[in-house]
Image: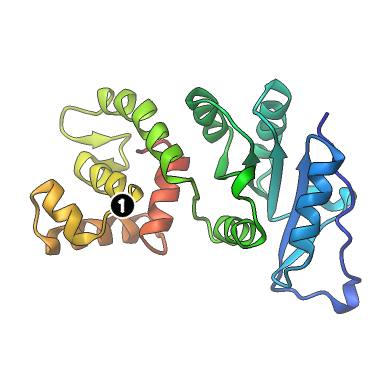
Amino acid sequence: MIVQMPGGTLPASVGRPDRVTVAVYAQDLVLHIGIVQQLRQRPELELLPDGEADGAQISLVVVDTVDDEVTALLQRLQRNTATRTGLVVGTFESAALQRVIESGVGAVLRRSEADQDRLLHLVLALAKGEGVLPGDLLGKLLSHVGSLQRSALDPRGLSLSTLTAREADMLRLVAEGLDTSEIAEKTSYSERTVKNVLHEVTTRLQLRNRAHAVGYALRNGLI
């Protein structure tokens, strides 16, 4: 059963409007308390109680595995346009990873790595519209869905009418951690061309930077 308990917010008179509001959902009370204890210490965040959860900027779901109940919760949160969803999870298979991404999850963190700093990074990245995935999970996701998406590309090089095949390829390399010079070497383009292509993507889609572009492309199934 997914449980949510009051987050213990500060009174409105001492609240800070620049805080990121967070609602925590967990499969059991122990998990919930552990995450809340860590997040409550961060002045950048404000934990919302149960009655205000639907208005949270970030919904953080903490589970052991992704089962049907968790998927149903993620899909319900996806329909809430006020919130972005992050997932802290024990273990799951590649197919489950694809399922959570399709359910609108923008960031994933393993429970074994969920210390206070990483949790804060995940929440703040989501608040900026950026995606966060561990490198090995990102690789699994890209290999699992990338071939399917590439097989559906328009023969003229268009990917879902939003990214060209070249833009998508470069964003995949950014997602794998390559810098400009490494992408240039991998694609046989000049560094200037790589910079221009990535700049064109971020400008056209009104994104902040390369990381934001990768997160956008992942959430919208473009890479």
Residue 120, image x, y percentages: 63, 61
Q: Label 1's element? A: helix
Amino acid on which the number 1 mark rests in the picture: Val
Horizontal arrangement in the rendering, residue 167 relative to residue 132 (left or right)? left
Q: Judge whether 194 appears above or below 163 on screen.
A: below
Query: Which residue appears at 17% of the width and 60% of the height?
Result: 181
Residue 107, image x, y percentages: 55, 46
Horizontal arrangement in the rendering, residue 169 relative to residue 53 (left or right)? left
Type of colouring: rainbow
Query: Which quarter of the figure has residue 39?
Result: bottom right
Query: Which quarter of the figure has residue 118?
Result: bottom right
Q: Quick one: quadrant of the N terminus?
A: top right
Q: Nearer the viewer, residue 7 or 129?
A: 7
Horizontal arrangement in the rendering, residue 153 relative to residue 14 (left or right)? left
Query: Which residue appears at 70% of the width and 29% of the height?
Result: 70
Q: Nearer the viewer, residue 65 or 113?
A: 113
Query: Which residue appears at 50% of the width and 23% of the height?
Result: 95
Horizontal arrangement in the rendering, residue 129 relative to residue 112 (left or right)? left
In the picture of the structure, the residue carrying the numbered disc 1 is 174
Residue 149, image x, y percentages: 32, 27
Q: Quick one: quadrant of the C terminus?
A: top left
Q: Judge whether 8 appears above or below 162 on screen.
A: below
Q: Nearer the viewer, residue 136 or 161?
A: 136
Instruction: Decide if residue 179 is in sight here.
Output: yes
Residue 36, image x, y percentages: 79, 55
Query: Which residue appears at 68% of the width and 53% of the height?
Result: 58
Q: Judge whether 156 appears above or below 81 on screen.
A: above
Instruction: Decide if residue 55 is in sight here.
Output: no
Disc 1 crowd rating (10 Å Cα; few below 14, some 14-19, many 20+) is some
